[in-house]
Every structure is written in structure tokens, then in C-alpha cells.
Amino acid sequence: MNPDAIAQFWQAYLAILPPDAPHRQVRYIAESFGDNPALADELGALIRQGRKTATCSALWEWEAEGTPIPQPGLITIVLDGPGQPLCIIETTEVTVRAYNEVAAAFAAAEGEGDRSLASWREAHWRYFSRVLPRIGRAPTEDMPLVCEHFRLLYPLVSAASAQGGADAD
């Protein structure tokens, strides 16, 4: 993670806002998506393209870290695998639901693979099988997931570019 690059990216975002914009007073976090640099690059690119507008994580991870789950209004600078800033998002909705209750619309909003629920279930089962053992857990059909929707704030993309993009695993 490069704190100077992150601060410069934030300042570039603030420079496009009107002087009285509420985001000028907001604190942000900077983090990558996924559990490895290649996945961070892949997911970050989907977010920057506007194709990925949702994400999820296991509630158990938040509990193990003692960290509150994200809330609407959270501003995140999304980082790539090496920790460089790619884009800025704002959380718009957060719900907790069981893995086996995730709907096809949410899977499509995650923007990965072919955007189907079947593809989502397969990829996320693999992901949770990798990350949950680190906290002494294993994935289950009824594991609680923190399902988060977000919107891209910066840089903005055109509607045409949001439709394209390569499939992700």
C-alpha cells in the first residue's frame, strides 16, 4: 500500500467536487478486494469498469476481527494487487443473508464470471473455502454473508464501458 499515492488519489477526487460537497468531510478506507493480488486486480478492474456494483464477505470474518460491518455511506478507495488506488466507491446498502439465500440479482451485481447465480455460488464457495479456515471456520450453506451494494464515485465510467469487460472467476 502506498499512502502517498492514496492521498493524491483522494485529493484528485476532491478536486472535481464542488467546494460544499459532503464528501469533503468524509473519512475513507483504502483496501483491495479478494484474498490475493491477482484477485484484487481482477475485482478492482470490474469495479472500475462499472460492471461490479456489489460484494460480499462472511459475517464470521468481521466477528473474528472484532470489526463492525460496513454501513451505507462508507467511502472506500479500491486498491489493486500491489496496493495502488484504482477507484473510489460508496456503500449504498448492506444486508446480512445466508449463502443459500443470495438471489440471482445480487450474483449479477457482483459482476464476476458469467454473472449467473450458479457461477457466483461456485466461485464464492471456493473463496470461502480458502479464507474461512484462517479463522477456524468452514463454509456452510447457511453461513451469514454481509452483502454490500456500492456505487462508483471516481473515476466515472460511461454506460457503454460498464457493459463490457472480461469475465472474472
Image: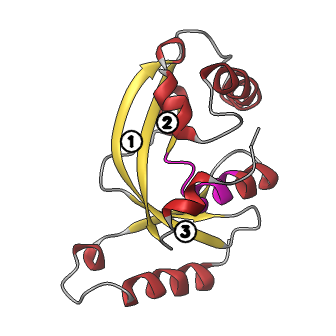
Q: For the C terminus, which image quadrant? A: top right
| Residue linked to disc 3 | 87
Tell which circle, 2 or 3, labels the residue nearer the N-terminal end. 2
Kind of residue sitting beneath label 2: Trp
Q: Which residue is mark 2?
A: 62
Three-letter amino acid code at the position of disc 3: Cys
Front-most of residues 63 and 123:
123
Q: Which residues are magenta?
A: 43-53
Vertical side of 8 occupied by 139: above or below: above
Secondary structure found at label 3: strand
Residue 47 covered by magenta stretch: yes
Q: Which residue lies at the image location 74% right of the left edge and 43% below the top edge?
A: 168
- Is 107 placed left or right of 39 in the picture? left
Contact between labelled residues 1 and 2, with CB atoms less than 8 Å apart: yes
Q: Which residue is mark 1?
A: 68
- Mark 1 lies on a secondary structure that is loop
